Image: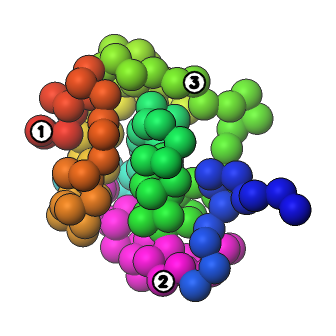
């Protein structure tokens, strides 16, 4: 029997809703990212997805799993065909977010910070408990 990959939801998960559905947790989170970043829903959605995926791959496996289980499934239900590169330094992280969402690194920094702030507002204990690489701590501080 194979284990589900890190992007698979856990049975009984309540935060992200059922795969393929857009729940209020997802919509509210993306709306919050959009407000914080001053962008429309579609741009905020892409930025939030890119940030969550890039952060997940910067973390060790157990931490990655905890993050992905805690966020709405729609934020990580599709991994790009060319994958997500692992970056534990801030410039690399921002370059990867920028690549995934088609933005400049400066735009990616602002949108990633908005995403992380929105996640922290919803589950600060989770974000604080993740062993985020030292190079990315500045982004979490806002």
Q: Which mark is residue 14?
A: 2
Region in magenta: 13-34
Assign the N terminus to one quadrant of the image.
Answer: bottom right
- How far apart are the alpha carbons under marks 3 and 2? 29 Å
Q: Report the number of numbered marks.
A: 3
- Which numbered disc, 3 or 2, marks the residue that appears first in the sequence? 2
Quadrant placement of the C terminus: top left
The residue pinned by badge 1 equals: 141
Pointer 3 residue: 85
> Residue at the left extreme?
141
At x 12%, y 38%, the residue is 141
Q: Is residue 101 visible to us here?
A: no
Q: Residue furthest front?
A: 1
> CA separation, marks 2 and 1?
27 Å
Secondary-structure class at tag 2: loop
Q: Residue at x 24, y 24 (%)?
A: 134
Question: Can you give x and y, in whole percent of width and height, for residue 140 in the image?
Answer: 20, 39
Residue depicted at 25% across the width and 52% down the height: 129
């Amino acid at each position: 029997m194979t284990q589900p990959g890190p992007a698979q939801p856990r049975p009984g998960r309540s935060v992200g809703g059922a795969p393929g559905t857009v729940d209020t947790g997802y919509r509210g989170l993306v709306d919050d990212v959009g407000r914080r970043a001053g962008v429309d829903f579609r741009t905020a959605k892409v930025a939030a997805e890119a940030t969550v995926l890039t952060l997940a791959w910067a973390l060790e496996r157990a931490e990655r799993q905890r993050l992905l289980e805690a966020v709405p499934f729609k934020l990580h239900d599709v991994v790009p065909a060319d994958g997500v590169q692992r970056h534990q330094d801030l410039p690399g992280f921002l370059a990867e977010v920028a690549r995934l969402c088609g933005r400049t690194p400066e735009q990616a920094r602002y949108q990633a910070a908005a995403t992380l702030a929105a996640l922290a507002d919803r589950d600060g204990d989770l974000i604080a408990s993740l062993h985020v690489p030292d190079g990315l701590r500045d982004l979490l501080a806002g």
